[in-house]
Image (cartoon, helix red, strand yellow):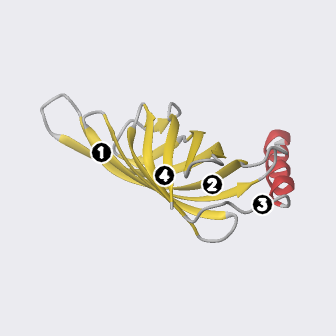
Amino acid sequence: MKIKLLVVLVFIAISFNAKSQDYINSVGFRGGLSSGVSFKHFLSTTDAAEGILAMRWGGFNITGLYERHVDSFDVDRLFLYYGAGGHIGSWDNNLDGSADSFIGIDGIIGVEYVLREIPFNISLDWKPGLNFIGGPGFLSDELAISFRFMF
């Protein structure tokens, strides 16, 4: 219980130190155990929606996330972000050649650096997920790096 309270207090504290991003949209490659395409759109100076289309286990996964970006490292153009969302997809179960569908929820926490000289950003994040329908249940191995073009 004390750890949950500490996590909530940390998120509240860093939320007050919000700083705006230098872009509205970005699109690029997301690489990890699930690799694919990432699109991020800022809804406000701190809040963004991210869509991910990724491939894994011989299938695909579509994820939608709502994220909060905060400046908490005292480093110009480096942001912490966290959020939650959901996913839906299909994977090859390798037993009879058929595909199984899955639906679940995701969390995300990461860091993003916005390059100054060129319109790109780089992010590193961890996106655990929990499948409610189909799939392998809890997924804790979704660590990825993304390279996105900003426009």
Q: Is residue 9 left or right of residue 139?
A: right
Compared to residue 108, the image places residue 143 above or below, namely: above
Counting other residues with Cα less than 10 Å from the Cα at mark 3, is it few (<14), some (14-19), or many (20 or more)?
some
- Asked if marks 1 and 3 touch (Cβ < 8 Å), the reply is no
Residue ID at (32%, 49%): 89
Q: How far is mark 4 from mark 2, CA to CA? A: 21 Å
Mark 3 or 2: in front is 3
Q: Which residue is mark 1?
A: 60
Residue 142 in picture, x, y percent from top left = 50, 35
Mark 3: amino acid = Lys
Disc on the earlier residue, 2 or 1: 1
Residues at marks 1 and 3, CA–CA distance in whole angstroms: 34 Å
Q: Decide which of tag 4 and tag 2 comes sooner along the chain.
A: 2
Q: Which residue is mark 2?
A: 83
Other residues around mark 2 within 10 Å, as few (<14) / some (14–19) / many (≥20) = some
Q: Is residue 151 left or right of residue 23?
A: left
Please give the residue where the numbered disc 4 appears in the rendered image: 149
- The spot of residue 18 in percent (x, y) is 79, 60
How far separated are the C-alphas under marks 2 and 1?
22 Å
**Regarding mark 1 in the picture, which secondary structure is present there?**
strand
Q: At label 1, which amino acid type do we have? A: Phe
Kindly report which numbered mark, 1 or 3, lies closer to the viewer in this rendering.
3
Foreground residue, 19 or 4?
Answer: 19
Mark 1 or 4: in front is 4
Viewer-nearest residue: 12 or 99: 12
Mark 4 or mark 1, which is nearer the start of the sequence? 1
Q: Measure the C-alpha gap from mark 1 to mark 4.
A: 23 Å
